[in-house]
Image (spheres, rainbow, N blue to C red):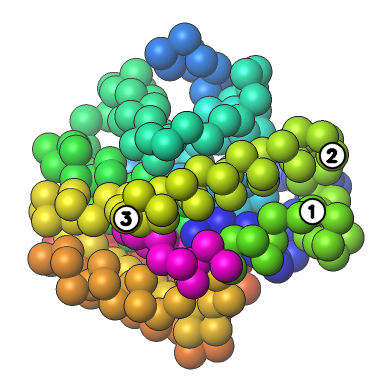
């Protein structure tokens, strides 16, 4: 569901991409939302990043390498993240559902009424909510690193990444560059507290909404994911009626970055097949 040991894009790589792709902003429910449109394909897919992630850190290999004659990607920064600031990111108890509403309203503002959704980690959870609440808009859904509930074991995993002073330089530097140390510390502490509170109240994030998802759903899982145990994609596969599970035996939390060629081919086929 969120932060991960991945090789994030460097500042130079981001700048080289930015010369070819132009980010835009819209005012959604009083907040600035940053997004990027890539491709000219007939199938439009909204991409939702993970915890504190941005469209550049979380989807560089999709922005650059996806087949743009097949898919049109709309990649967004969640409220309070990346270019969707100010204000800074906050984590009230309903933030997954609030994020889903911002995503739906972004697509409405862009006059796109029917689209697929890809969501990673925290963005995958919001994607589940989005598909459940807006079945008339979401045509297909792909999620990975996502979960519909929080267990006591999950909380222990989250505690292991709470202290940013224990992160490796490779992991922490892009987030420090984006947010600064104080904001990053505060955001991680607030996020962990919110998930702990959810777990104490039963752990339900969006379990009850899974039965409302009617869009064909692709659930992707890296079997070596240290953050999201296999029980979560298995649960999603069981509860979402029209779903299938594809596992990457050597994949971790960032399967779409590490194995982007295989991942891109998989989602290209999924979002374009009848």
- Is 154 magenta? The answer is yes
Q: Residue 66's spot in the image, x, y percent?
A: 50, 58
Mark 3 or mark 1, which has the lower sequence index?
1
Label 2: how many Cα within 10 Å (few below 14, some 14–19, many 20+): some
The residue carrying mark 2 is: 181
Q: In this view, does 102 lie above or below 73?
A: above
Range of residues picked out in magenta: 145-156
Q: Residue 205's spot in the image, x, y percent?
A: 33, 50
Q: In this view, does 89 lie above or below 242?
A: above
Q: In which image quadrant can residue 4 be found? A: bottom right
The residue carrying mark 1 is: 164
Q: In which image quadrant can residue 244 be found? A: bottom left
Structural distance between the alpha carbons of marks 2 and 3 = 32 Å
The residue carrying mark 3 is: 202
Structural distance between the alpha carbons of marks 2 and 1 = 9 Å
Residue drawn at x 62%, y 73% as measured from the top left? 258
Asked whether the viewer can see residue 162, the reply is: yes
Between 69 and 135, the residue placed more toward the observer is: 135
Q: Residue 224's spot in the image, x, y percent?
A: 55, 84
Q: Residue 144's spot in the image, x, y percent?
A: 42, 65
Mark 2 or mark 1, which has the lower sequence index?
1
Q: Is mark 3 on a helix, strand or loop?
A: loop
């Amino acid at each position: 569901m969120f932060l991960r040991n991945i090789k994030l894009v460097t500042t130079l790589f981001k700048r080289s991409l930015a010369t070819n792709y132009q980010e835009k902003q819209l005012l959604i429910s009083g907040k600035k939302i940053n997004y990027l449109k890539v491709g000219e394909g007939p199938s439009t897919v909204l991409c939702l990043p993970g915890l504190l992630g941005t469209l550049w850190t979380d989807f560089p290999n999709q922005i650059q390498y996806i087949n743009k004659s097949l898919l049109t990607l709309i990649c967004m920064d969640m409220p309070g993240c990346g270019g969707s600031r100010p204000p800074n990111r906050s984590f009230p108890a309903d933030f997954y559902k609030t994020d889903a509403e911002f995503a739906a309203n972004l697509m409405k503002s862009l006059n796109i009424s029917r689209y697929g959704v890809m969501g990673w980690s925290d963005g995958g959870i919001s994607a589940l909510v989005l598909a459940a609440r807006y079945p008339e808009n979401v045509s297909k859904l792909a999620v990975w690193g996502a979960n519909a509930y929080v267990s006591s074991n999950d909380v222990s995993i989250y505690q292991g990444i709470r202290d940013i002073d224990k992160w490796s330089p490779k992991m922490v530097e892009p987030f420090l560059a984006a947010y600064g140390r104080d904001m990053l510390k505060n955001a991680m502490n607030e996020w962990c507290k919110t998930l702990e509170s959810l777990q104490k109240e039963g752990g339900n994030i969006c379990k009850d909404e899974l039965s409302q998802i009617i869009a064909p759903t692709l659930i992707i899982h890296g079997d070596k994911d240290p953050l999201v145990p296999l029980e979560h994609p298995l649960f999603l596969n069981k509860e979402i009626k029209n779903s299938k599970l594809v596992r990457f035996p050597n994949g971790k939390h960032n399967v779409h970055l590490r194995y982007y060629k295989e991942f891109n081919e998989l989602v290209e086929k999924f979002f374009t097949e009848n």
